[in-house]
Amino acid sequence: MSRVWINGVLTDAAEARVPYDDHGVTVGDGVFETIKLAGGVPFALGEHLERLDRSVAALRLEPVDRPMLIDAIGEVVAGAGADGFLRVTVTAGRGPLGSPRGAADQTVIVAVRPGSVRTEPTSVHVVPWTRNEHGALAGVKSTSYAENVVALDVAAAHGGSEALFGNTSGNLCEGTGSNCFVVLDDRLVTPPLSSGCLAGVTRALLLDLLGDDAAEAHVPMARLGEVSEMFLVSTAREVQPVTAMTGEVDVALAAPGPGTIAARAAWVAAFG
């Protein structure tokens, strides 16, 4: 049976509990990271915890003690299977049933869920709603995920496994849980962080691997119909070809095209 670590207490997953008035439950006041486990080893753990620290700071939460968190991860992973996904969640802790925070200590949760990386070709649905690249949560991996849930539900209703958002400037931003790369004007590009997208760990590692073969550049939503190739990147997708876009844009794509094949090959050569 898997185990969950909550505020220093390791318990069976079936017995894990947080209070009804935890601010992460009542108003989504928290942040999280999802980390791939490969052979029982968390992949790119340092990069994920650095991003967790940035998200914590952006939400004006208290810094999480890194040695404590590393120990907690070790305890949870030791009782888990070899593969799956590690989830670290930090919330503001117990508080009023409204937006103001209380004075309670924060809640820190470490858990593991089963799962495997999805690399099979998929389709995406371009939704009409926009990300606010100037908002307080731009680029933050927050537990306030209702917008993503709605968008992903719409995408699923249209046969897609991911929804894509533009931003208020009319440029491509990101998926609900992924970054995207596209081939436009014969260039492989991904939206810059200024688009409001999450600073994806997979995105950053892949940009380093590809060097001059990929670049950050704004992709106008009005030009998505001209894209010849697209792939999604994330912890749970690594490099996933996109076969088609539906919704605000309706176009078939090469999947996998040469850019996707090269990106996947670079990833496998570096990380297996």
Image: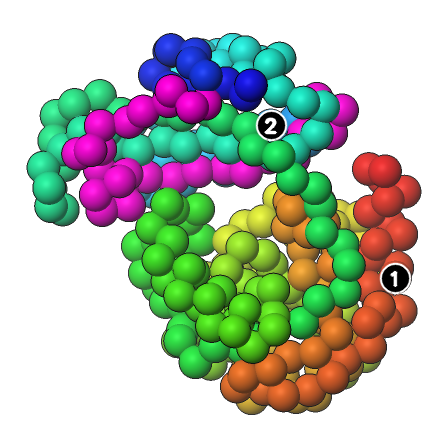
Residue behind mark 2? 46
Residue 30 located within the stretch drawn in magenta: yes
| Residue in front for this viewpoint, 19 or 106 | 19
Residue behind mark 1? 261
Q: Are marks 2 and 1 in contact (CB under 8 Å)?
A: no
The residue shown at (32%, 39%) is 30
User: Which quadrant of the figure has residue 177?
Assistant: bottom right
Q: Residues within 10 Å of mark 1 (few under 14, many from 20)?
A: some
The residue shown at (58%, 49%) is 200
The residue shown at (61%, 64%) is 161
Q: Nearer the viewer, mark 2 or mark 1?
A: 1
Q: Which residues are magenta?
A: 13-41
Q: Position of residue 129 (x, y in %)?
A: 40, 76
User: Which quadrant of the figure has residue 20?
Assistant: top left
Tell me the kind of residue under disc 1: Ile
Query: What secondary structure is marked by label 1?
Result: helix
